[in-house]
Amino acid sequence: MNISAFIRNEVVRPRLTKASVLAVYDPDRRYRDICLSLADPDLAVVDTSESSIEAREAAMRALATLGRPGCPKELLVYVPARAPLTDEARQTDPVRGLCRLRRQLPRRGRRRL
């Protein structure tokens, strides 16, 4: 198993399965391809690299349909930026609401992804 497969199968996938909604903050853009490779009919992947506003809208639409027949059961939001650490930064983070609803990677106070 290569490192990408390990990260996908042993780190991201279990956390996503547990939370059902996950934001991956990646300022170095190391995990983008891994995150995008997880997309399938049961997992919606939203990439905020191009437009955070459009991506947030797509993520909110996906969140609203999670678990409905014929819709994804999980949502992963890829964010090519640092996770917000201060209250002020969290207020301006376009996916903050999703993270508060579920979980985020990396988690504050824990090791990085």
Image (spheres, grey):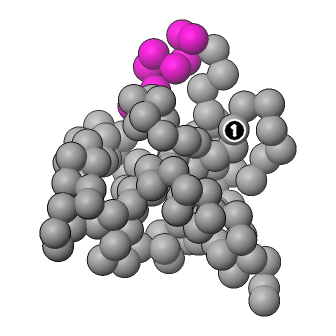
Q: Residue at x 52, y 20 (%)?
A: 90
Give the quadrant of the N terminus: bottom right
Q: Amino acid at mark 1?
A: Arg
Q: Residues within 10 Å of mark 1 (few under 14, many from 20)?
A: some
The overriding secondary structure of the stretch rendered in magenta is helix
Q: Position of residue 28 (x, y in %)?
A: 69, 51
Range of residues picked out in magenta: 87-94
Q: Which residue is mark 1?
A: 107
Indicate the secondary structure of the residue bearing disc 1: loop
Verify whether residue 93 appears in magenta: yes
Horizontal arrangement in the rendering, residue 40 relative to residue 96 (left or right): left
Q: Of 45 and 28, which appears nearest the observer? A: 45
Q: Position of residue 19 (x, y in %)?
A: 51, 51
Q: Residue at x 50, y 76 (%)?
A: 37
Residue sitting at the far top: 88
Q: Position of residue 36 (x, y in %)?
A: 47, 70
Count of labels in the image: 1
Query: Taking 15 as reference, is 110 above or below it?
Result: above
